[in-house]
Image (cartoon, rainbow, N blue to C red):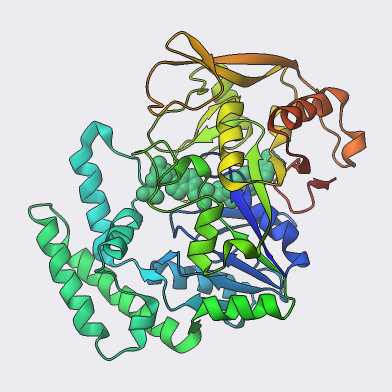
Amino acid sequence: MKTDILLGLQWGDEGKGKVVDVLAPNYNIVARFQGGPNAGHTLEIAGKKHVLHTIPSGIFHSHVLNVIGNGVVIDPTSFVAEIKEIEALGTDICKRLVVSKRAHLILPTHRLLDAYSEAQKGKKKIGSTLKGIGPAYMDKTGRNGLRIGDIMEKYFSKRYHDLLDKHKKLLGSFEYDDKALAENEKKWMQSIEFIRKSLLCTDTEYLLNDALKQGKKILAEGAQGSLLDIDFGSYPYVTSSSTTCAGACIGLGIAPSLIGSVEGVFKAYCTRVGSGPFPTELKDETGERICQVGREFGSTTGRKRRCGWLDLPALKRSIMLSGVTSLDMMKIDVLDDFEEVKICTHYIVNGEKTDCLPYNLSEEIVPVYKSFKGWGKLAASGNYNSLPAELKNYIGFIEDAVKVPVKLVSVGPDRSQTILR
Ligand code: GDP
Ligand code: IMO
Ligand code: MG
């Protein structure tokens, strides 16, 4: 058996959580492979909304084992709060959750370091979610980090305090509230205790590879999106992990030869939250309309998302980087009733037409658009064939351009508002 991968092809918030929840009945295991509580994956089930940050999006299916892989960074406080929130709904999820011993921990001081780093950057700030992601991955690659496996060891307290001292030195003159930090540390330690007692923390690379050998089906769930990738995103306005298909191999311990299909999720338009270049951004009424109709406000921070037309050069590149085999097109309903809908097919960079993303995305890029007639209003339910001809034309154009089929069309936030082709 091979592992299927589902990941975002834009700047995150494409609707990955919803699709994982829809597809989970076909899988035995759902596994997150990177990122941390910077993610906000929204699931709507029978009108009730759930936002997941660290817990994989297969959690509402009782037969699915949800694995948090070694590539993820975990903030125990927010992770345990998330578990308790779901448990309060009457679902005992601890038995459905397994954590890699190799997943790194986000310390309370990582969040302070994140805030410090942003303050130092001033106008050039990344627009980080301030969840401590960057500093935690820096300690990982700097070989200073603490991992979930360490919480079982006698040396844990000493190593924690050593790292804390190091962070306090790095924070130098940065002003922070000592009392609030002490309070956060207390909650953090209590959450560590909860994880130690209540969750299975193990070598998930063995668990996953054994499951594949036994014929079990695994879906790897990405966080963020390809344009936020540490290597291939709009650096430095990116996150600190590998969000492409290769990140799933590293973040779970699954060999490239064991990767099956790669499902790419994208919105019918583009959004971005935080700073950084966005070639097709609409800073006008149309952008505002997309934002309001699409309720484009961050699932993690509540920040307003910047909106713009679909960017094909960026989409093609994301598909190339991950070897995407099928596409899921989200939030089509948001463009209902638009008289005209546009797609950026090319850019003009330095007077030349290109469909490649330039190294420096912030240089003068003029998007070239193709205009499409709007499709009016979508019916409340129906199958692919019953979609308006104008919409099928819009989807067909994208498929022809990127040479990958659209297999799922999402027409609303609820699990049920999904058309499978
Ligand atoms: P993720 O981070 O990729 O999981 O996406 P988010 O949950 O951050 O953002 C997607 C938002 O769009 C959430 O509020 C979803 O409930 C919502 N959503 C997902 N699919 C659709 C859709 O087809 N139509 C509409 N209107 N909303 C959707
Ligand atoms: P999901 O999984 C959208 C953005 C932040 C910021 C940059 C760096 O819900 O799609 P970080 O906190 O990682 O240091 O922030 O990345 N960002 C996201 N944008 N969706 C996300 O996750 C994001 N995770 C991080 O806004 O611009
Ligand atoms: Mg999100």
Q: Quadrant of residue 392?
A: top right
- Viewer-nearest residue: 314 or 271: 314
How far across and down, in percent of the image, does residue 309 sit? 59, 24
* Above or below, 251 relative to 208: above
Left or right: residue 283 versus residue 164 is: right
The answer to whether 406 is drawn above or below residue 199 in the figure is above
Q: Is residue 358 left or right of residue 293?
A: left
Residue 269 is left or right of residue 116, and the answer is right
User: In the image, residue 331 lies at what x, y percent?
Assistant: 69, 38
- Residue furthest out toward the left: 173
Quadrant in the rendering for residue 389: top right
Furthest residue toward bottom: 154
Residue at (75, 76) in percent of width and height: 215
Question: Considering depth in this image, is 364 or 303 the residue closer to the camera?
Answer: 364
Q: What quarter of the picture does the C terminus occupy? A: top right
Is residue 93 visible to us here? no
How many labels sit on residues?
Answer: 0
Pick out the residue farthest to the front.
257
Task: Report whether residue 236 is seen.
Answer: yes
Q: Position of residue 248 (x, y in %)?
A: 54, 60
| Res. 310 image quadrant | top right
Considering depth in this image, is 398 or 42 the residue closer to the camera?
398
**Residue drawn at the location 57% of the way across and 27% of the way down:** 313
Residue 256 in percent (x, y) is at 58, 61
Q: Is residue 162 left or right of residue 265?
A: left
Query: For the point 64% across and 77% down, which residue is it?
Result: 90
Q: Which residue is at a point 32% across and 74% down the rendered structure image? A: 188
Quadrant where the N terminus sits is bottom right
Residue located farthest toward the right when viewing the structure as drawn: 385
